[in-house]
Amino acid sequence: MRAARLRLSGFFWRHRWAKALLLLAPPLLAFGIIYLASLVALFVSSFWTVNPFTTEIEHIWNLDNFRTLWESSAYRSIALRTIGIAAAVTLADAVLAFPLAYFMARIASARSRTFLFVAVLLPLWSSYLVRVYIWRLILNQDGVLNWTLNKVGLPDVHLAYTNFAVWLVFTYVWLPFMILPVFGAVERIPHSYIEASRDLGASGFATFRRVILPLALPGMIAGSIFTFSLTLGDYVTPLLAGGASSQFIGNVVYSSVGISNNVPFAAAFAAVPLAVMAVYLLIARRLGAFEAM
Amino acid sequence: MIRIKRAHVLFAALAVALCVPAAGVSSGNGLPTTIGKGEGSLNLVAWEGYTQAQWVKPFQKATGCQVHPKYAGSSDEMVTLMRQGGGSQYDMVSASGDASLRLIYGKIVQPVNVKLIPDWKNFIPGLKSPSHNTIKGVHYGVSLQWGPNTLLYNTTKVKPVPTSWSAIYSPKYKGKVTVPDNPIQIADAALYLSKANPSLGITDPYELNQKQFDAAVALLTNQKPLIKKYWGLASDEIDLFKNGDAVIGASWPYQTNTLIADKVPVTDLIPKEGATGWADTWMLSAKAKHPNCAYMWLKWISTPKVQAQQAIYFGETPANTKACPIMDKLSKGSCEQYHANAPAAYFKSIKFWKTPIADCGNGKNDCMDYTKWQQAWTQLKG
């Protein structure tokens, strides 16, 4: 028994690659089978169609689903709305997150930094659904917002169940995912850089524009991967906070699978955000976002 | 409670005593003529709320059939579940009218002998052999409960009282209208058009040719700017009315009752064009492993008391006319509230959900099928 163990140990000593393989096999298998295989299955099924009478999937290769997507103006506008709102959410989160992240990283005392961290992360402890519903309570006709406006003598606003509401809720819900990477990037800027900039006579604004912002940018891009992809794939917020024309790609996927049992069409439409994200990640890599994560 | 239990112990004892060669025995048309000994188990696909302990527990006690329910979230999920494992995994399904034809034509369910269900003769005439579960006189299940899709409105904001579905298609209440987020809504538009525009020749809102279908979709497309929100869950619509975001819309009696209980000034009615509605049927899988327990369940679920309990729990109308007095005993005024004592004309004014299929009986296969309905709905919402 002991001899066998020694032999085994010796084998791994002589063959380093075997040890590495043994160590990495489980996560690699999980990644390959669970993650990549399901993506491939998704992509493959998007080239099939559903028999309209029996609603069974027919394994005949064709491009009908993609043609429908391309030719219908409704699906085009749904895709553009999804990408547009995802971009607007990302931009708003970046603008909102930077000052707070900067304050937390460079100005706040250790104690207030801890406090701010808790404040940023606390909403993540409550259910995502609850937070969406809370916004409905705030925005609706007889909600908190209009009540407050009326108290100070202003007229009602009609924000509930609009695309604006969808944007607002997304911006709120994904904000922590932007703050954290930006904080990481700002914290890593060496103080000596800022001092050097000052010594060379740069104004506060020039230091911000030429030193701090470029070094914080990878953090923002890293955060934007979260905010952008999370918005791109979501269907709950448009369903709950959206109005008459707030369908996202996710909503069409959901109803294609859930209502008409048309998995191939859902797969074809789901390939759109996949392609958008692939392009986005390529750009993000160029901008150095992966070093800031 | 005691009375029912005894009756069923008696029934079970009788069944055991007779212990006739079980469900295998069949008459000439292949239907069982007696209910044999229970198999001890029953697997159901059901809407949530259809297998509540208050009527399942006494059933299990009386028959020894252990009920294993699986809740489905949509009609399509029900069809998918019934297909699983070659169709023998589940014994029964509480299919709505928009799923039942798919199950019948897909040969997933089998005919049942309604003579074995004593309460069947007490059903309202319209639900004995409705077209969504009975084909050419062959019964593919036993009706359960039903309800209309009503016009719900805020009584202080909507004046005068609306009498036509045109109220949700006219700009008068722009931005304050809500309708269900469901392709079957096209049938509501078609129902309205069948009266408002007779030249289209719509006779059945679920059987639409291309021209009629396009007209209904165009009506809904024009309605879109008036819509505050297409509601997905009943609670969404309740929120919209409670908070003043909507004042008029298409609804179910459940929402009306909930809102009235919350002291929101609303009421509902069936406009002069009539209304669409849903009617659920317990259907038996073609490969059911526990057919005797299934027949016992059909018998049990059709009895007046169980019908009344379920009607009140879910807010729908029982098929059994004898349920009315029991409903009033369980919850005062509930019989009238859920229209259990309404005249036959009320039932006739409702066009019940059924799956739109290409074959609409004229031999031309020129009707729009459900896939087209779903695509049109997604596209008009945009």
Image (cartoon, coloured by chain):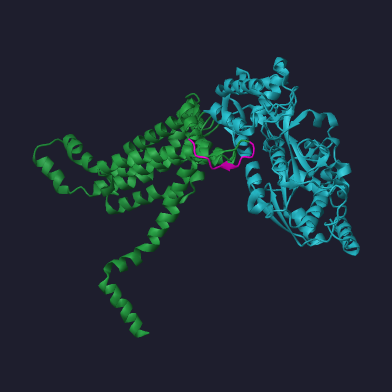
Q: Is B31 on the left or on the right of A18, as rendered? A: right
Q: Is B368 on the left or on the right of B306, as rendered? A: left
User: x, y (%) of residue B141?
Assistant: 78, 45
User: x, y (%) of residue B44?
Assistant: 71, 52
Q: Is B215 on the left or on the right of A5, as rendered? A: right
Dominant secondary structure of the residues highlighted in magenta in the image: loop
Q: Residue B132 lies in what quarter of the image?
A: top right
* Relative vertical location of residue B374 with respect to residue B287 in this rendering, above or below: above
Q: Is residue B354 visible?
A: yes
Question: Which chain wears cyan?
Answer: B
Q: Residue at x 83, y 33 (%)?
A: B342
Q: Which residues are magenta?
A: A53-62
Question: Which chain wears green?
Answer: A
User: x, y (%) of residue A224?
Assistant: 34, 41
Camera-side residue: A257 or B211? B211
Screen quadrant of the N terminus of chain B: bottom right
Q: Residue lying furthest left in this view?
A: A200
Q: Residue lying furthest top in this view?
A: B199
